[in-house]
Amino acid sequence: MQQIEPLVRAMILTPHILVAEGLKKLLELTYPGIRVEMHTHCGPSTMDYTDASLRLLIVDSAQAFYVPRIIASLRRKLPTCAIVSLDMGPTGTHHHIQFDDSISTLMTADQIIVAMRELLTVQDKTPSAPQLTRREMDVLKRFVMGMTAKEIAEHLFISIHTVATHRKKLSKKLGIKSVSGMAIYAVSLGLLQPEEVDSHKRE
């Protein structure tokens, strides 16, 4: 039987074996066709393992010395690759990490699970990007940029109810409910640039 090439390739960079194994298992259960690679040590040679088939990169802040360099290099080499960050502080709490203002979506551990489940499910069900109207694209971009429904309504001169309706239509078309999931999906397909994610919140 001819082997089917995986639709998605993911890379996990973390020194924590149990964390890597858990995320790897989650991805494989969610999307059987995925190929997941784990690296417990990262350094200058890490980028040698990246190519156009890489769609997801999960990095751990424990690799703090090289992570900013790897992300910056990856964004230049593979701008459509979705980048998420898993941070496990000494207290066991999860929080956002921002290496610099130009990095793509960086999310906490629970958001990684939700967003990647949604992203991989969407890619499994819809090989090509769904057709979005111009208005739906406008609303999607502004949600991902971090604007509230009220701000979107004021900016586009429409009612909050209309914004909510567009949001429901987007969720149905994309098969994604969370904004973080929409962000990964939009960036991975090139609908948005990584620096546009949450850009409104940084103004």
Image (spheres, rainbow, N blue to C red):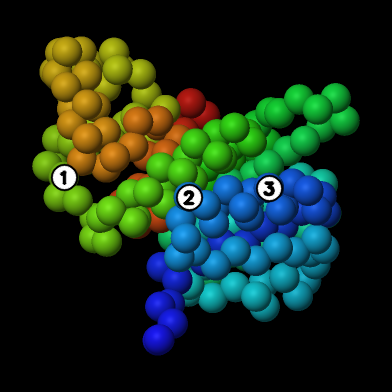
Q: Earlier in the sequence, mark 3 or mark 1?
A: 3
Name the image quarter holding the N terminus.
Answer: bottom left
Name which residue type carries label 3. Answer: Gly
Q: Which residue is depicted at the point 14% across and 18% down?
A: 162
Asked if residue 114 shows in the view, the reply is: yes
Q: Callout 2 environment at 10 Å: few (<14), some (14 to 19), or many (20+)?
A: some
Secondary structure of the residue carrying tag 2 is helix
Percent across and percent down for residue 4 are 40, 78
Name which residue type carries label 1. Answer: Leu
Q: Nearer the viewer, mark 2 or mark 1?
A: 2
Label 1 sits on residue: 132
Q: Nearer the viewer, mark 3 or mark 1?
A: 3
Label 3 sits on residue: 22
Secondary structure of the residue carrying tag 3 is helix
Secondary structure of the residue carrying tag 1 is loop
- Most foreground residue, 147 or 25: 25
Label 2 sits on residue: 30
In the rendered view, tell whether residue 120 sits above or below residue 140. Answer: below
